[in-house]
Image (cartoon, rainbow, N blue to C red):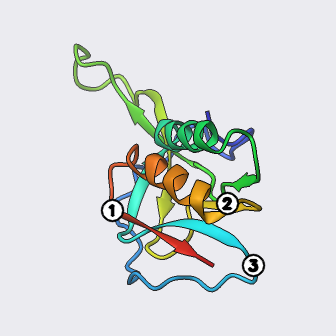
Amino acid sequence: MLQPKKTKYRKYFKPRILPKILAKTQKLNELNCLALIPIQSVYINGQQIEAARQNIRRKIKREGKLEIPILTDIPISRKPTAARMGKGKGKIHNWVASLSAGKPLFLLYGIIEEVGLPALQSGANKLPFKVKICKL
């Protein structure tokens, strides 16, 4: 799963606010690039990124280059359901990344649109938020 190799502290506070950014597409310098861009600001965890990545990779049959420019670097801890109050903070349950609207989530280089667009659409079906597919 996507998580940092080393962090300054073992456990962090939960993230409370999302970045307040409108859905404006970020301008990239690359040509012949397809991108999966979220329309709303969300938190995305490593399992969701990995499920979408596997689905996209399966559709394009190992052609082209798939780039993931985000890293899940915020740990979310959770205590067991039967635990009583007190006794400290729970173990790390998963890692999330803060994703701003308009920033690319997946970049796909070196593949034709007839293959790339359905692949990104199938990857978008695995994500729990609204995205759009852009040609950059």
Sooner in the amino-acid sequence: mark 3 or mark 1: 3
* Near-viewer residue (96 or 106): 106
Which amino acid lies under the numbered mark 3 shown in the image of this protein? Leu
The label number, if any, that marks residue 130 in the structure image:
1
The residue identified by callout 2 is: 108
Distance between mark 2 and mark 1 Cα atoms: 19 Å
Name above or below for residue 54 compared with residue 136: above
Distance between mark 2 and mark 3 Cα atoms: 11 Å
Which amino acid lies under the numbered mark 2 shown in the image of this protein? Leu
* Near-viewer residue (15 or 51): 51
How far across and down, in percent of the image, does residue 86 sit?
29, 26
In the image, what residue occupies the spot 68% across and 62% down?
A: 112
* Near-viewer residue (13 or 100): 100
**For this view, does 68 lie left or right of residue 38?**
right
The residue identified by callout 3 is: 31
Which amino acid lies under the numbered mark 1 shown in the image of this protein? Lys
